[in-house]
Each structure stands twice: as structure tokens, then as C-alpha cells.
Amino acid sequence: MKAEDILADLTEAQKEAVTHLDGPMLVVAGPGSGKTRVITRRVAWLVSRGISPHSILGLTFTNKAAEEMRSRISAMGAAPGTLLSTFHSLCARLLREYSLAAGLKPSFSIYDETDRKAALREACREAELDFQLFPPARVLGRISRFKNQLQGPDDIADKGYDLLSQVIKDYYAAYQKQLDRSSALDFDDLLMRMALLLDKNPGLVSELSGRFRYILVDEYQDTNACQYRIARKLAESHGNLFVTGDPDQSIYGWRGADISNILAFEKDWPQAKVVRLEINFRSTPQVLNLADHLIQANRQRKAKRLIAHKDGGEVPKLHEYRDAVEEAQGAVNWILEMKGNEQLDYGDMALFYRTNAMSRAVEEALYSSRIPYQIVRGVEFYKRREIKDVLAYLRVLVNPSDEVSLLRIINRPARGIGATTIKALRHHAASCGKALWAALEEADELEGISAAAVKKIRAFLDMAAAWQKLIDWKVADILREIFIRSGLKELLTGDKTDDALDNVNELIGSAARFDEEEGAGVEEYLRQLALLSDPDTFDRDAGSVSLMTLHAAKGLEFPAVRIVGVEDGIIPHERSQSSSDDLEEERRLLFVGITRAERFLSLSLAGSRTVNGMMRDSHPSRFLNGLEGIEFDIPNFGFGSRPTSSERIFSRSGKGYGFDSEVSAFAPGSAVSKNKKRGSRPITLPIDRPSSEEKAPEMEDNRPFAEGKRVQHPTLGPGRVEKFFSKDGKDRVIVKFDNGPRLNMDIRLSNLKLSKA
DNA sequence: CGTAATGAAATTTTT
DNA sequence: TTTCATTACG
């Protein structure tokens, strides 16, 4: 590719970034400012200057982004060989390559959230910690946070203000022990172990720096302490660190991302050049205007401009509905309107929501209206039980130490190795410090295991030994073999409403594709699987409406975007309302969603929706309060916003949302035709607390619920308070009820009453 | 020992 | 709603 082609149609700022040669550079790139373009052109530019593609390393945050760059670079005809990878998969690769130095077995397993939870359960059992005492997700979340800050169990000061803080260290230590024994790493370990390895191994650092002369990091605002350390180490010697990012699009703080990494870049690298990309090529001025008004409410940010390059366009709209079902129907009508009036293709449209669970209502409406859609969801497929089961066999094959996987399959399908036997095995393993696998082999010498059980165990071991011989087969063949011979297939065939069989077949199919394309063996297959989630299966040209969470939307763009559920408790999420930092992150999340839109944007909200199977009232998001740049489809809405033309259009009565005969052709007898008029009830906006005014201590006085107090529950009856503590600013108690159960409950939600006397 | 039935709880985002 | 864990029963 010629230099002038590489630089064609670039702005001055973009050119400066693309042609920057040596030394650190920070590109602050607002949404739609051509960031990906800059990165990919830059790779091409470097190569055109004689730099080997193999010495360029591009690090992204998601597979999707890495894939996007790969395809754009190859579309430019640039030389292949550049390593474009997520942090996680780079680390997994390197940790395997340098497993000896890292103190790992090259065949280590990678644990996802489900595995982590199982590991924690096992760890608790062994360390005699109460697994139920705290929500496991919460414990694991804490552990994650420590790991992201490069802290091991021993680095934690054991004093804390709440119960969990005081004991988290024990949980962490036990959990980690379980992982180590299993030769398993969780996602956080991949980063942490890599960072630590680089810390203590200067030789490796220089080797890698020699290998990767030019390092590019995308979405730098999303890096956590480990990722930061890794990037820094790799670039230390040559300083060729090129990072792009936008503080306003930092939405992963909850995962340990530290926005100050980007804010302090110039401090870390005093020679750094900084380029700002402020011209937005994506959206209409109206969309940008709204985005700008929204984000300006954030205190913690660097002022940045969004300069529209396009002109024309429509003012974004806001619609209110009575409930989530009507809201979904409204979305359907919007889609049909976009298609009919604006000549847009289904593939040009996207629906965003805050949480995956919210996709359901929308899906149902789309489905009954026969509108093709695709969902970009998280990891769903690989979380299915049957899939995890089959893969667990594969994992044990590769890594017999993997206890979580072993325990998962040892008696599934049931082969007579039940709880009692397993308990004895575990006990033995723990007391001799042996692996569970070893205990299996010695089962006949152990007490507490019946002759019958020993026989069953032998059979299991024989089966496993036979499978060892399959290890060089093609992955798809191994999977098929295991699936049948383990008895899993038979087990699943019995099921009634099963997609289970189909799912496993799909898995085998994808494995066959892997064999075809990569032909790299089981270990590599498992590693890739662990790190691959299926947003990558998202197909831009599928001709269907795209549905995804706001997080998944980052980095994408669509001519028409609709965001549903813009309600308090949804955006911002109810669990993000406690701190102003969290609140600002939620605002950035909405900002990210809005700035995905090229031409048409609409937001919607419902007056009620079901959450966890329960109907709940909902109110407009506080982010809408006083927000300029959007037209409200709600009479009497809010403070001071004038009725607009769109209001008159949309509130014309009797017609629903202006769908016409074309619509009913799509949805005969569907909810469309049943769509009701809704009343136009005035609504009140919640007060947007100034973000400086930290936390709201509107705490009730729960002190009477002290330890030892007798309490009464409307359904559970009488009990006694065993522990009183707070978390997340909520007072909770652990109550042992007289009729048995011991429960950890939120005082405010529990309906607990103090008993008299 | 294994499965079915029951009951209760649920952190939202992703690698 | 779904998921999970415990319990009861065969």
C-alpha cells in the first residue's frame, strides 16, 4: 500500500497520529472520530516504512475490537503477521509459552464465572468457611478487585469495616489454593500472573520488548492496574507505546479499569505527544448535541468537544410507555417506521438495553412481528450445562488436576459415585495433601468407600485412561467420542424439551471448524474457547436488527439506534446509585449508547416493568432531568421543556404510534393490532442529586436488630439474630429461624419484626 | 444412591 | 423469570 493511499482522506490530526513514528503517543479520540481508522492505517503506515508486521502488537479489550482491526487491516492489503489480540488472550498465550518461568503447567485450565463459583464452593468446604454466608458473586467480585490491583491474599490488611472485609482474606486464600491445586487460572489471574511474571523477570521483558517493537493499546481508558503494568513493561525499553482512548467512554470501572491511567499518561511518559480527534464523522449534529449535553453533567472529566462533520438530521426522541411490553411494541413500530419512511434496512438498526434480561420483552415483540433480529449476548452458549459438561471432560483429559471439572463429570451421568464416596475421596486427598485424581487411584485402600464404589471408580478411571489415547485426534472427533461413550448423550436424549442435543452438536460443529481452520489440538482449542465469547458471532450484514447491551455496543455504529429502559434503577442501575463515581460511569454508558447513532436516535422508558419476575414501578432516569437536545413524547413532561412538534405528532390520540396498514401486514393478529392507547399521565422526575453530595445516608435505624435479639418473620416465623452487619450501605442480618433455616437478609426488605420481650 | 420436588433468592455490565 | 440448594422419597 502506498503512503498517499494510507493517508488519503485523513484530517490533519489523524495524519499526525498515523505517521507518528517513535516514542509514546496518546490519542484522545472522541466517539466517531475515526479512531479505529487511525489505528489500522497506522499499522499499515509502520509496515510501509519497513517495519516488520511481526514486531507490531495491537492490544484491545474485546475480541470484537481485535477482529474488527484484523479485518480492516487485511482489507487494506497490509501484510499479515501483526499480532492483534486482547490482553487476556495475549497473556494466556504467553503464560503457556513461558509456563516454566511462570510456575505453571502449560496445560492450565481457564476458569469462567461458573467455574469460579464452583471453585469457591469447594474451597469453602475444605477451609470450613461458610459458603452461604455471603453471596458468592460478591466474594468473587472482591477477589477480582484484589487481583486487578495485583494483590494476593497476603497483601490484604485484615481489618475492615464490615463483616466481609474482615474475612475476605480467608476466602481469597482458600479460593486461590483451590485454583492452584487445580492448575487453573481465572480471567484475572491471566493478567495478574503475567504482570507479576514481567516484574520479576527482566530477561523476559527484554525478550518481549525485542519481539514487539511497536505497541498499540486501544481503549486505554479501560485498562486496569495489571493491563497498565503489562503495557508499560513491554514498552519501557523502546517507549513505542501508542494508546488511544476516551475518558468519556470509560465504562468498565466495575472491572477494575482505572480511568486515571489515561488521564495520567502524560505524566507517565513525559515525552508523550498528544493528539486529539474531536471531529465526529459518525453522527448528526442533533445526536451529538444531546450526547454533549448529557456528558457535560459529569464532573470528573476533561472538557472535550464533539464537532459534527455531518449536517442535517433529526432531533432525538424520547417515548414513554406504560410498561415494558408496550415499550417493546413501540420499538417494533419504530423499526417499521424506520424501514418504511426512512428506507432503512433492518441491519441498519440497533436496540440497546442496560441488562441482558431486558432483551426478553423486546425479543418477544420482534418475534411476533416477524422482524429478523440478532442478539449479541455475553457468554450464554458456553454457560449451558450440557456444553460445560462436555467441555469438562475435555478439560480433565488435558489437565487432570482440574478439580472443578473433575467433580463436575465424575458422576455425570450418574455412575454410582455419589456424595458419600466423593466426600471420602476429598477427605483423603485433603489429609494427605494429594490431588483428587490421586485419591481416585487409591480408592481401594481407603476407608469409607464400599467395594461397590471402588468398582465404579475403577470403571471411571479405565474410561479416562482409554480417552488419553484420543488426545491427538481432531477436537471434533474427541468431543463426539466422549459425548457418546461417557453416556452423556444417552442422558440428554432422555430429556424432554431439550435443545441440549442440538447445542452439543453445534459445539461439535464449531470444533470441526476449528480443526479445519486451526488444526491446533485440544489445548489450544480449550484456551481459545475460554476466552472467546460470542459477540464475535455478531454479523453486521445479517440484515437483521441488532440487540445488545449498552456495554456490548461500544465500538459499533448504526444509522438508527433506540435505547430502551431509560429509567432510574436501570440507567443508572440501582446498584450504581451509591457513589458519584458509579453514577458518572452510568452516564458515560448512556453517552456511549447515544453516540452509536449515525442519524436516528430515540430513547424510551416504561412506567413499570418486571424485574426478577416481579412487577415494579419505574420512573424516568435522572439523567433525563433537564436534559436538552431531546424531544419528549410525553405531555406535561418534566421541568421547563416546551411542547415540541414531535410531541404533537406523537401524542395525537387514537392512532397508537402512527403505524399504518403496512404494519398490520407484518403482524396479523399480533400485539400490534391489540396495542392500546395509553393515558397521558404526568410524571415527576426524580431529583438529580449533585454528584458532589456523596452518598445518601437515609438509613433507617436498624440498631435494634442486634445480635441475639429475637425476631419474627411473617412467613418464616420466629428466629434469632446471629449477626448484624452492613454492606453496600444496607443493613443486613443473619437470622437463624427456629424451624431450621439460617438466612442472610436485608432488614429493610425482609419484613422482619422484633419480637416483644 | 439418584432423582424429583420444593422453596428461596437474585449484583449489571465482560474477559 | 430462572437458577440454585436443600429435602424427601423411591
Image (cartoon, coloured by chain):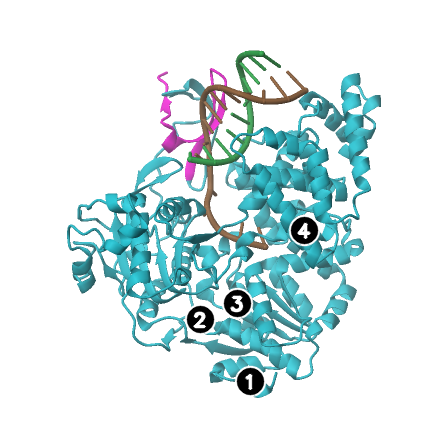
Chain colours: A cyan, B brown, C green
Q: Position of residue A103 (x, y in %)?
A: 78, 51
Give how far apart the Cα atoms at labels 3 and 4 are: 42 Å
- Residue type highlighted by circle 1: Asp
Task: Report the residue at 61% width, 72% height from top.
Answer: A74
Tell whether A78 sits left or right of A713.
right
- Residue type highlighted by circle 4: Ala
**CB under 8 Å between discs 3 and 2:** no
Q: Position of residue A674 (x, y in %)?
A: 24, 43
Q: Residues within 10 Å of mark 3 (few under 14, many from 20)?
A: many
Q: Please tell me if label 3 and label 1 are on a single chain.
A: yes
Q: Which badge, 3 or 4, comes first in the chain's sequence?
A: 3
Give how far apart the Cα atoms at labels 4 and 2 are: 41 Å
In this rendering, the label closer to the viewer, 1 or 2:
1
Asked whether the viewer can see residue A157, the reply is: no
Q: Please tell me if label 3 and label 2 are on a single chain.
A: yes
Q: Which badge, 3 or 2, comes first in the chain's sequence?
A: 2
Task: Report the residue at 67% width, 23% height from top.
Answer: A419
Give how far apart the Cα atoms at labels 1 and 2 are: 24 Å
- Residue type highlighted by circle 2: Gly
Task: Report the residue at 31% width, 69% height from top.
Answer: A289
Tag 1 residue? A5
Q: Does the magenta segment cover residue A441?
A: no
Tag 3 residue? A262
Q: Residues within 10 Å of mark 2 (few under 14, many from 20)?
A: many
In this rendering, the label closer to the viewer, 3 or 2:
2
Q: Residue A649, which numbered label?
A: none
- Residue type highlighted by circle 3: Ile
Tag 2 residue? A30
Q: Which badge, 4 or 2, comes first in the chain's sequence?
A: 2
Please tell me whether residue A494 is drawn above or below residue A546 in the rendered image. above
